[in-house]
Image: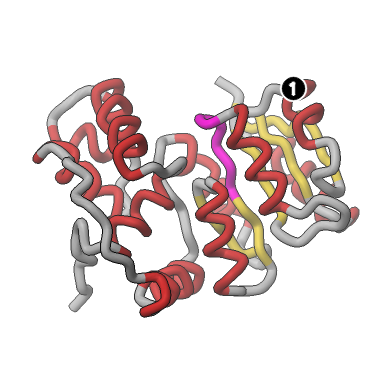
Amino acid sequence: MMKRIIIFDDNDIRREGLELLLSLSEGFECVGTFRDGSQVMENIINTNPDVVLMDIEMPNVNGIEAVTKIRAKYPDLKILMQTAFEDDEKIFNSIRAGADGYILKKAKPNDLLKAIEEVLEGGAPMTPSIARQVLRMVNSPHEKKEIPDFNLTSRQHEILSLLVEGYSYKMIAAKCNISFPTVSSHIQAIFEKLQVNSSTEAAVKALQHNIVQEKKTK
């Protein structure tokens, strides 16, 4: 099945390059390219994409504003943010708006295609440098809050822990020996309990409030 991608980027040359990359890559189809988010809802309705590739920095309506608008009507549409600069505040605001994953514009073409695949499978792709920025924000004392228990079940806690580790829905299903629809059902329940809109935001909130602990690499 073709993966339908819509691109928002204010750089004409980059938009053309991304469109060409997708058209030459098996299984991908670019269904629209736009230079800003001023008509984002109309653009989404007209193209019916599977994934939105969204630039953070755009004129008129930027990527964060556009994501907020999309999430209000399309809570399940996958959104992958593009960023040229590792700006802590903008990345964290994108998470809060409901973006599913992040990738630097300088990433290799294959890494971009893999990120699109991963976000479609329910993962939350981030380049290592962006992940470090997000975790730095999470560990900021200004972001720590005392909050009530979220009443997660043991299975939901297990699945949330795997999301924090970067597992996609498919990988969680295999790890927990449950079906993909069951994973999706559990994750939707987790989103409701945590009051978040994406796997990335759920993972950040889990770390932020010590619901689960980040695994340290040796």
Question: If the image is split into quadrants, where does the N terminus sit?
Answer: top right
**As drawn, 146 above or below 49:** below
- 71 relative to 32 in the view: left or right: left
Q: Residues within 10 Å of mark 1 (few under 14, many from 20)?
A: few
Residue 130 point in image, percent of width and height: 50, 69
| Highlighted range, magenta | 75-80
**What residue do we see at 29% from left, 48% from top?**
163
Please give the residue where the numbered disc 1 appears in the rendered image.
Answer: 45
> Observer-nearest residue: 197 or 109?
197
The C terminus: image quadrant: bottom left
* Image-based side of 61 in relation to 89, left or right: right
Q: Is residue 36 magenta?
A: no
Residue 78 highlighted magenta (yes or no): yes
Residue drawn at (70%, 49%), measured in percent from left and top?
65
Residue at position x 76%, y 61% in the image = 57
Q: Say if 44 sits above or below 115 in the image.
A: above
Choose top left, top right, bottom left or bottom right for residue 14. Answer: bottom right
Residue at 22% x, 23% y is: 179
Q: Is residue 123 above or below residue 13?
A: above
x and y percentages locating residue 13 in the rendered image: 88, 56
Q: Is residue 40 left or right of residue 132?
A: right
Q: Secondary structure at mark 1?
A: helix
Whole-percent x and y of residue 46? Answer: 79, 21
Q: Position of residue 149 (x, y in %)?
A: 19, 50
